[in-house]
Image: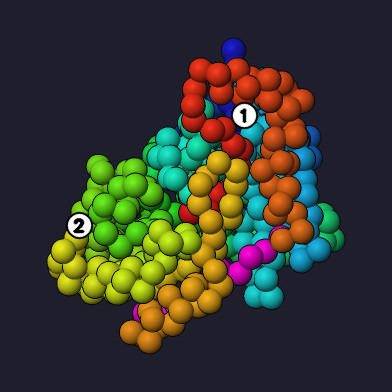
Amino acid sequence: MTTANLLDFDLAGLAAFCERLGEKRFRAVQLFRWIHQKGASRFDDMTDLARSLREKLPAVCEIRPLKVMAQQASTDGTIKWLFDVGDGNAVEAVFIPEDDRGTLCVSSQAGCAVGCRFCSTGHQGFSRNLSTGEIVAQLWFAEHFLRKHLKTSERVISNVVMMGMGEPLQNYSALVPALRVMLDDHGYGLSRRRVTVSTSGVVPMMDRLAQDVPVALAVSLHAPNDALRDNLVPLNRKYPLAELMAACGRYLPAAPRDFITFEYCMLDGVNDQPEHAQQLLALIRGHSPYYSGPAVPCKINLIPFNPFPDSGLRCSARPTVLAFAETLNAAGIVTTVRKTRGDDIDAACGQLAGDVLDRTNAAQRMAQRRTTDTRPVHVVRRNG
Ligand code: SF4
């Protein structure tokens, strides 16, 4: 019999699990708090659980962490972890400390099926969905590692962004319980404003998220017209801008913030010209050939492209990025340029995964794939 992984459960799921063991709901709350608030992984350490329960649990369940394959720390405090998720797959989580917050960027899939042109994860292809437990394990590990490292019992991670590898809304059934664990006061107790799901625009699931767990929403836009977006974000062919913008409008009444964040990766000569800024303004205002409807309250985050081999794309020049931002800001759309963090480890980002995977003969397998598959293969660097 395979044992259950308790990281797979939100509190309702854990209560149901405990009930099947003949235990009351308050036992589930105790267990949940030990796991997520105190970082316990051994039942013996859960001293206020009845001894009979502590003896019963190891036969039926465990707290299953992800194996850390590599860790890199930047001089600016950014820390990246590479986690082994089996079968030669690895995913990254990144901790980004700032003065007033600590943000963890979490992965939802090994690889990604969306295949955005500017994203190395997209070039890598899709391996599999992560389980709820594998999503939660990234936060569980990072939070309790950081508390030990910083010698504090206070919460270190105040914000989670589902912006690592994968399209979270294409792994919806695992994502929702993971978000509930993050928000639960007996778990990580994060506010809905401080948990962000980033999507490339899976419209039906945006509507469901608004119903099920309406956290903050970021949309990877990257283009102000359908022809360009079809090329950069292939999912646009299924859910074009008119549908996406309308879905953003529908999301807002349930959202914890009164705006959507649009992410826009700045690509030299591709989407960074003055006419693109004007098209973007028209799109947001609902006066575009691609979307006509109510204006979508938003903030825009311009992301300097993080080049990787074989992308065929270059980062926009800094003056071009600033001019693009100025056009939008002058029109009253709050626009920021994403700070690059962890510069000294950034260059090694793809290499970190690549080096580790090489130990599992990934290079050999990739070379074999290249002979039969013309798609370039890269590992773990997300621009979206
Ligand atoms: S940007 Fe996001 S949705 Fe697009 S390929 Fe990369 S991980 Fe997938």
Quadrant (top left/top right/bottom left/bottom right) for the N terminus: top right
Q: Is mark 2 within 8 Å of ligand 1?
A: no
* Residue position for label 1: 89
Residue 63 quadrant: top right
- Pick whichever of labels 1 and 2 is earlier in the sequence: 1
Which residue is labeled 2 in the image? 242
Q: CA distance from mark 1 to mark 2?
A: 36 Å
Residue 171 vertical position relative to residue 33 in the rendered view, above or below: above
> What are the residue bounds of the magenta stretch?
333-342
Decide which of 376, 288 is in the foreground and name it. Answer: 376
Q: Residue 259's x, y, as percent?
A: 36, 71
Q: Which mark is residue 211?
A: none
Whether 140 is among the magenta residues is no
* SS type, badge 1: strand
Q: Position of residue 193 (x, y in %)?
A: 47, 67
Closest to the observer: 243 or 255? Answer: 243
Q: Judging from the image, what secondary structure is the residue with disc 2 in?
A: helix
Amino acid type, callout 1: Asn
Query: What amino acid does circle 2 point to?
Result: Ala
